[in-house]
Amino acid sequence: MARPLLESQAHNASIHELKEAARVGSSETALRCTAIQMLVVGINRQQICQALLVTNRALRKWINAFNQSGVDGLIVRKRPGRTAILTGDTANELTKLIDTPQSAERTFGQQKRFMAIFLKAIKSNAVINFS
């Protein structure tokens, strides 16, 4: 059995508010706002999906977000990135060594040797001691 069609609740925001959110936000936010604007005007869902090159599932998600939170539900939030592998003193020391390799007080015959020590320090997450 097919899911019932969700209808966008136009009272959540005006066309003007959707246009403003589309201008301020990212391109993904603009796409979402455009889709809701098209629905409010009365354009068929299938035509919206074809015109904006999105899936019906994505459109349903956007309608749900709009119905629950209004325009705020369409705004794309920054997603958390990958957690840092290096933290604290180790990251600061490695950054310093990269920026000023002469501070290692050691000459490296080859760049490979420096990278080997550098990678070993990263893997062990330890403070580097070049002496």
Image (spheres, grey):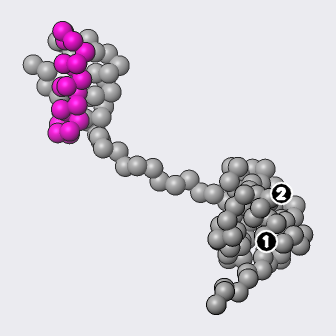
Q: Quadrant of residue 15?
A: bottom right
Residue 19 tag number: 2
Q: Position of residue 58 (x, y in %)?
A: 65, 67
Using the image, determine if residue 111 lies above or below residue 16.
above
Which residue shows up at 79% across the image and 65% down it?
48
Residue 85 tag number: none
Residue 13 painted magenta: no
Residue 113 painted magenta: yes
Horizontal placement of 78 versus 38: left or right? left
Which residue shows up at 73% across the image and 82% down it?
5
Using the image, determine if residue 122 lies above or below residue 8.
above
Horizontal placement of 115 versus 5: left or right? left
Q: Secondary structure at mark 1?
A: helix
Q: CA distance from mark 1 to mark 2?
A: 19 Å
Q: Residues within 10 Å of mark 1 (few under 14, many from 20)?
A: some
Which residue in the protein does label 1 denote?
45
Q: Position of residue 74 (x, y in %)?
A: 69, 63
Q: Amino acid at mark 2?
A: Lys
Q: Secondary structure at mark 2?
A: helix
* Bounds of the magenta segment: 108-126
Q: Main secondary structure of the magenta part?
A: helix
Q: How many marks?
A: 2
Q: Nearer the viewer, residue 31 or 48?
A: 48
Q: Earlier in the sequence, mark 1 or mark 2?
A: 2
Q: Is residue 103 visible?
A: no
Q: Nearer the viewer, residue 74 or 52?
A: 52
Q: Amino acid at mark 1?
A: Arg
